[in-house]
Amino acid sequence: MIDHMTFRVTDIQRAKTFYSAALAPLGYSLSFEGNFGMNILGFAYPDAAEPEGKKADVWFIDGPSPYGGAPATTGCHLAWRAANRAQVDAFYHAALAAGGRDNGAPGLRPDYHPHYYGAFVIDPEGNNIEAVCHLAESVS
């Protein structure tokens, strides 16, 4: 089970604006914004099992790592699970409205499995992000 992941970005304010909009339909919100020698954003999903009712599991850090490597995380695929197909649709439209580029409109992907309903967007850094619902039908 994955606990959290971190991505480097070239423009933290752009990442904040984009991901605040794109992840809101999935129930995520900005839960941490700070500076520890670098600007950091954390996005969390409500989870009653966590001590404070939520825990940031997606982090963004402004600029290159002091240990070398590329200045931003690019070319990755990151998918968030949606509770229903309407959330997938809302994620897609919010991400496009916030500056993302279409990489696959919402719809069934039966080649993955019969109920795989997903949408794909290229984020401002060039990552392929997705919202996916695995349920046979939309559940509210």
Image: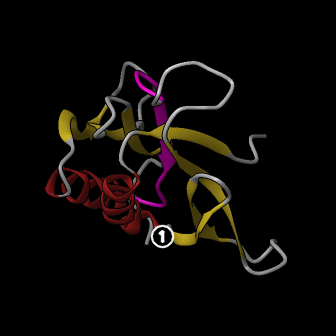
Q: Residue at x 48, y 29 (%)?
A: 73
Is residue 81 in the magenta section? yes
Q: Nearer the viewer, residue 79 or 31?
A: 31
Q: Is residue 5 above or below residue 57?
A: above
Q: Nearer the viewer, residue 15 or 22?
A: 15
Which amino acid, by three-letter code, is at mark 1?
Gly
Q: Residues within 10 Å of mark 1 (few under 14, many from 20)?
A: few
Residue lying at the far bottom of the rendered structure:
52
Where in the figure is residue 106, as x and y percent of width and height?
24, 43
Q: Residue at x 57, y 18 (%)?
A: 69
Instruction: Provide the residue span drawn in magenta.
Output: 73-86
Residue 134 appears anywhere in the view: no
Residue 72 appears anywhere in the view: yes
Where in the figure is residue 109, as x and y percent of width and height?
33, 29
Secondary element at image label 1: loop
Colour scheme employed for the rendering of this structure:
secondary structure
Q: Nearer the viewer, residue 64 or 102?
A: 64
Residue behind mark 1: 27
From the viewer's perspective, tell me whether residue 124 is left or right of residue 93: right
Quarter of the image that includes the C terminus: bottom left
Where in the figure is residue 20, as x and y percent of width and height?
38, 65
Q: Is residue 99 above or below residue 107?
A: below
Q: Residue at x 35, y 25 (%)?
A: 110
Quarter of the image that includes the N terminus: top right
